[in-house]
Image (spheres, rainbow, N blue to C red):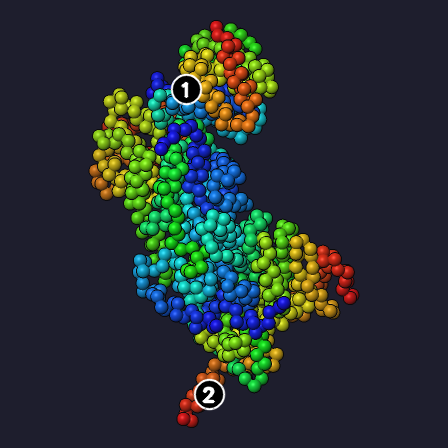
């Protein structure tokens, strides 16, 4: 049964205030939600890739992590935590350790989709009992908003600027969750903070499966996306409603759509509040907007097919 | 349980690390042995607007608690208790997600003025 | 109990790892250290060790996972060569800065490019300022002995640093040699049960590792590493003395061979030191006052021991099996010449870069070096102090 | 030092077992209390390419690690390799042991040398008869013992057995075949 917020608020806080993430940062929300799925008597070791989350949460001599924590480098959070998990299995097997532990690694989209993909793929393939959480904010925010392979098509970043000739990023997002699902691991999910029950449920499942689990969370960056900071939840809701960020899970190879938007909402609704897409609405860029919508539709149809749902064509 | 109460003591009970300590006194490799001691670091002064609670309107749904990036909604016994102004950065998300508009964002300037006015009255 | 056996260098290293019985090994194959990984896998598959073997997808992950395991509180090891070490480079620095006592053998091989699978020391020299202890081994016996001692050195409370055990690719790694190995119990008693100073898996004392340091702390944490390296010099000698008691073999920071009354010395590491000793013996038989100095520890650099060992000689040749492209000679040359600077007794120092990409160091090459040193002493002049041994010019 | 250290060079083709033979010989001789080295020359070559392997044998510990340039003994696993590379660096009194159906006189003509001692043995046929496959390296060790007279045959066989038993615990027929191969080569090797 789903826990209520009343109950969850009484669970020990594993990511405390006093960290130096931006005011309103999506990562703070995402991390708190994921770790809140652990019970008070569960021990956890957190690994973290270099990025905003890591540099803002462990500024010596302060740590916001109310548990054991390890940061190694940018691209190797998965490998590092896989080593911690291997040590756990070894020490347990030898009777050198009594306590039980869970293992989770957090990485941004840069550290996961791009530079850390090999390390993540290796760890997933080897079957370590660990959860990898990608906090996807669609660019390298820590270094100042450079495009990553998670950056949506059309987005204005500092390395895919909206210029006179090239209007922002030209390539669609990499479908990371599908890529990880192809590793045939027990659990893969895509979720979004607008639906906290969905995040909670998925985090709980991920911590409980016997093997690797991967969760991709849409985690907005107020600075990089240039939206009104307090509107974060509404914005993420729009990402889900417009089918830009569908909620789904892949359990033991079975794809399942977790929420099907009731009506067709144009991706414009998600793009409009964000400064990074401002140029998309400028006269002359109508084709770009069309391309973005086409990309969303294409990926949505592919997802429906994977999930065994009836195809649903856009009304036009 | 609130994070700040729990962890403040952890940092200050043993020796606190400070920048005037020499290399021998600092922890090896920059390890931190007091989990969650960031609670001792106050980010409240980042704030230019602050959330103010309207008890009348609050239904204690704790949606604000769920969406606070800084764990700065303090709850007791599953009910809203107070804001942790030592850490709240004033992002305004709590006010935005509150279904009953029980949280209002007021500028710190305004709060300051009100305080001064109150003092003058006394 | 000693046991005389015929093993290749890789076999000797794998046997040492079996006896150490680490909790975790994360490794990736690369020529010429692959055999170690293969042999260790078979120990795991046959239940000869308690180790969790993590078959990572790259050397970067090999070191990363080994670090995770070490930080977790396990005795953890990896193993590599050449490009593998180069690929690890980034995290080798992090492992040192996190003060993780990881022991990792390195079968030395030339770095690309051009691609070459044979021995030189360019891989090891690439990490000489990473903050790891680097021990070098003349033959399979020393590779084995260094492995066992490395555990004690790495885990010493005053050190707490990674230790790499270097031995020459193919020349040592693949050559069958006769050596003595200790029995398992002696090794286990010598290395002891690992008690980590902090561990991610300690519920009573959680720890946050790999934190973000600003300029107010970074410098001091870096100096802690310097102090640990300084302490390592003492610890390497102490552990060497203790090891002599169980093995009968003496190990210090350097191996000074026939240097007491020598006029000329060759400074050289790994297998080439053996060949140099052979030539030294022949020349000694002819009445020439020659000697060999073999640094065993390259990092920390035992400059005091080197200055002491060479203080009486007139001319020194430093043999480097790696190039720096500084146009100022090889890496060891710079350190040795630096070490002799304050002696102020006008020791002539000349550098020979040799054996790159596995080119054989022939005995007549070493003879030529001694003959060159003789000329230098006679003329009192060193022209062309960086020389390329056997290079077709 | 060369007086004390006996140096051997093996010539073979990738896959014929020159490396295995060098290591096997070294292991066996080490069992007999001598100091040895056994090492191949490694290259990127695959199956079929000419390759070299080396041994050093001594009563004293061996320090040197350079390649063998002036071998006292040359062992050739494949007669098609007979040529200048086989004779390179070999002193006047060097010993050649060749796997061939030819006679020592014929090999001498082919190698175009005056000095040295030449021994031949049909190791291919022997291994085919005894082991069931063409693996000339094992019988060549028998020829080596006979040709060099460096060690007693009985002691050598005893130690080879020990080494084989380590490697083929579960396959006694392999051990027997190999021993038979060495025996026959020891008997059949021809000198001048």
Q: Quadrant of residue D152?
A: top left
Q: Nearer the viewer, residue C175 or C207?
A: C207
**Left or right, A182 with reference to D115:** right
Asked if marks 2 and 1 fall on the same chain, the answer is: no
- Is label 2 in contact with label 1 (beta carbons under 8 Å)? no
Q: Is residue C134 above or below residue D62?
A: below
Residue B114 is labelled as: 2
x, y (%) of residue C119?
Answer: 44, 34
Residue occupying the point 52% across, 71% down? A10
Q: Is residue C309 visible?
A: yes
2 or 1: mark nearer the eye: 1
Residue D7 is labelled as: 1
Residue C9 is labelled as: none
Q: Nearer the viewer, residue D163 or D97?
A: D163
Residue occupying the point 55% across, 12% down? D122
How far is the residue under mark 2 from the one under mark 1?
98 Å
Q: Quadrant of residue A6?
A: bottom right
Element carrying mark 2: helix
Q: Residues within 10 Å of mark 1 (few under 14, many from 20)?
A: many
Identify the chain of the residue marked 2, using the numbered disc in the image.
Answer: B
Q: Is residue C379 above or below residue C238?
A: above
x, y (%) of residue C339?
Answer: 28, 42
x, y (%) of residue A33?
Answer: 56, 66
């Amino acid at each position: 049964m789903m826990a209520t917020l009343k109950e969850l608020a009484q669970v020990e806080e594993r990511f405390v205030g006093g960290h130096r993430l931006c005011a309103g940062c999506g990562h703070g929300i995402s991390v708190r939600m994921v770790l809140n799925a652990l019970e008070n008597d569960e021990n956890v070791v957190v690994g973290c890739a270099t990025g905003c989350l890591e540099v803002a949460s462990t500024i010596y001599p302060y740590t916001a992590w109310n548990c054991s924590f390890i940061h190694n480098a940018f691209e190797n959070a998965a490998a590092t935590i896989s080593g911690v998990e291997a040590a756990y299995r070894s020490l347990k097997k030898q009777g050198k350790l009594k306590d039980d532990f869970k293992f989770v690694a957090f990485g941004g989209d840069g550290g996961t989709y791009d530079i850390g993909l090999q390390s993540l793929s290796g760890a997933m393939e080897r079957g370590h009992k660990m959860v990898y959480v990608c906090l996807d904010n669609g660019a390298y925010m820590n270094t100042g908003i450079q495009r990553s392979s998670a950056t949506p098509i059309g987005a204005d970043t500092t390395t895919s600027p909206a210029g006179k000739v090239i209007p922002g990023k030209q390539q669609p997002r990499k479908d990371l969750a599908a890529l990880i699902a192809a590793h045939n691991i027990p659990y893969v999910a895509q979720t979004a903070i607008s639906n906290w029950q969905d995040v909670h449920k998925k985090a709980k499942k991920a911590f409980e499966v016997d093997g690797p689990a991967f969760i991709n969370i849409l985690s907005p960056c107020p600075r990089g996306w240039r939206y009104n900071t307090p509107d974060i939840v509404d914005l993420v809701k729009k990402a889900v409603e417009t089918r830009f960020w569908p909620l789904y899970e892949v359990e033991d190879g079975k794809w399942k759509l977790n929420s099907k938007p009731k009506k067709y909402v144009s991706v414009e609704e998600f793009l409009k509040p964000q400064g990074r897409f401002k140029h998309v609405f400028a006269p002359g860029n109508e084709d770009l907007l069309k391309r973005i919508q086409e990309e969303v539709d294409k990926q949505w149809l592919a997802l429906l097919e994977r999930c065994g749902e009836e195809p649903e064509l856009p009304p036009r | 349980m609130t994070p700040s109460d729990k962890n403040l003591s952890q940092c200050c009970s043993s020796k606190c690390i400070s920048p005037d300590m020499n290399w021998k006194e600092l922890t090896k490799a920059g390890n931190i042995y007091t989990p969650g001691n960031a609670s001792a670091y106050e980010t409240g002064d980042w704030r230019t607007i602050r959330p103010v609670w309207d008890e009348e309107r609050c239904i204690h749904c704790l949606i604000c608690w769920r969406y606070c990036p800084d764990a700065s909604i303090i709850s007791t016994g599953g009910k809203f208790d107070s804001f942790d102004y030592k850490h709240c950065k004033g992002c305004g998300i709590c006010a935005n997600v509150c279904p009953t508009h029980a949280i209002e964002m007021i500028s710190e300037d305004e709060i300051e003025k009100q305080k001064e006015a109150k003092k003058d009255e006394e | 109990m000693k046991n005389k056996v015929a093993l290749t260098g890789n076999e000797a290293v794998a046997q040492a790892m079996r006896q150490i019985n680490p909790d975790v090994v994360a490794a990736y194959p690369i020529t010429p250290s692959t055999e170690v990984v293969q042999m260790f896998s078979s120990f795991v598959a046959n239940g000869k060790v308690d180790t969790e073997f993590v078959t990572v997808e790259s050397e970067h992950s090999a070191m990363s996972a080994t670090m995770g395991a070490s930080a977790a509180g396990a005795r953890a090891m990896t193993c590599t060569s050449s490009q593998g070490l180069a690929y690890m480079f980034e995290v080798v620095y992090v492992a040192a800065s996190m003060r993780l006592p990881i022991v990792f053998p390195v079968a030395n091989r030339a770095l690309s490019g051009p691609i070459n699978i044979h021995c030189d020391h360019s891989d090891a020299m690439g990490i000489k300022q990473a903050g790891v202890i680097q021990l070098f081994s003349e033959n399979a016996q020393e590779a084995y002995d260094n492995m066992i001692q490395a555990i004690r050195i790495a885990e010493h409370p005053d050190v707490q640093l990674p230790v790499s055990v270097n031995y020459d690719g193919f020349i040592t790694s693949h050559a069958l040699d006769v050596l003595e190995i200790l029995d398992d119990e002696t090794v286990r008693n010598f290395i002891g049960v690992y008690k980590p100073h902090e561990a991610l898996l300690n519920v009573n004392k959680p720890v946050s590792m790999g934190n973000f340091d600003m300029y107010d702390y970074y410098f001091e944490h870096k100096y802690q590493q310097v102090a640990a390296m300084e302490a390592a010099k003492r610890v390497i000698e102490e552990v060497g003395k203790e090891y002599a008691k169980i093995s009968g073999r003496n190990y210090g920071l350097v191996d000074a061979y026939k240097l007491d009354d020598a006029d000329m010395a060759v400074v050289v590491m790994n297998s080439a030191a053996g060949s140099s000793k052979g030539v030294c013996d022949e020349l000694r038989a002819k009445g020439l006052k020659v000697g060999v100095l073999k640094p065993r520890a390259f990092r920390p650099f035992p400059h005091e021991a080197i200055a002491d060992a060479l203080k009486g000689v007139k001319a020194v040749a430093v043999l480097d099996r790696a190039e720096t492209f500084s146009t100022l000679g090889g890496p060891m040359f710079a350190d040795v010449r630096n070490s002799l600077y304050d002696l102020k007794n006008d020791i002539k120092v000349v550098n020979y870069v040799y054996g790159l990409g596995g080119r054989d160091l022939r005995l007549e090459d070493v003879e030529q070096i001694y003959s060159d040193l003789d000329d230098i002493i006679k003329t009192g002049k060193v022209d062309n102090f960086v020389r390329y041994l056997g290079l077709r010019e | 030092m060369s007086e004390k250290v006996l140096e051997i060079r093996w010539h073979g083709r990738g896959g014929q077992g020159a490396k295995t033979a060098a290591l096997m010989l070294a292991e066996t001789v080490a069992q007999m209390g001598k100091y040895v080295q056994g090492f191949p020359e490694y290259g990127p070559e695959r199956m079929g390419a000419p390759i070299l392997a080396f041994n050093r044998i001594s009563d004293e510990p061996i320090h040197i690690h350079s390649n063998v340039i002036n071998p006292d003994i040359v062992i050739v696993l494949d007669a098609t390799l007979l040529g200048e590379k086989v004779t390179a660096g070999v002193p006047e009194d060097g010993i050649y042991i060749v796997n061939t159906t030819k006679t020592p006189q014929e090999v001498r003509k082919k190698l175009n040398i005056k000095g040295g001692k030449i021994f031949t043995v049909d190791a291919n046929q022997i291994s085919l008869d005894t082991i069931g496959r063409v693996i000339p390296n094992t019988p060549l060790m028998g020829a080596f013992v006979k040709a060099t007279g460096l060690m007693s045959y009985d002691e050598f066989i005893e130690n080879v057995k020990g080494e084989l038993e380590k490697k083929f615990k579960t396959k006694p027929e392999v051990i027997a075949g190999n021993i038979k191969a060495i025996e026959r080569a020891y008997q059949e090797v021809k000198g001048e």
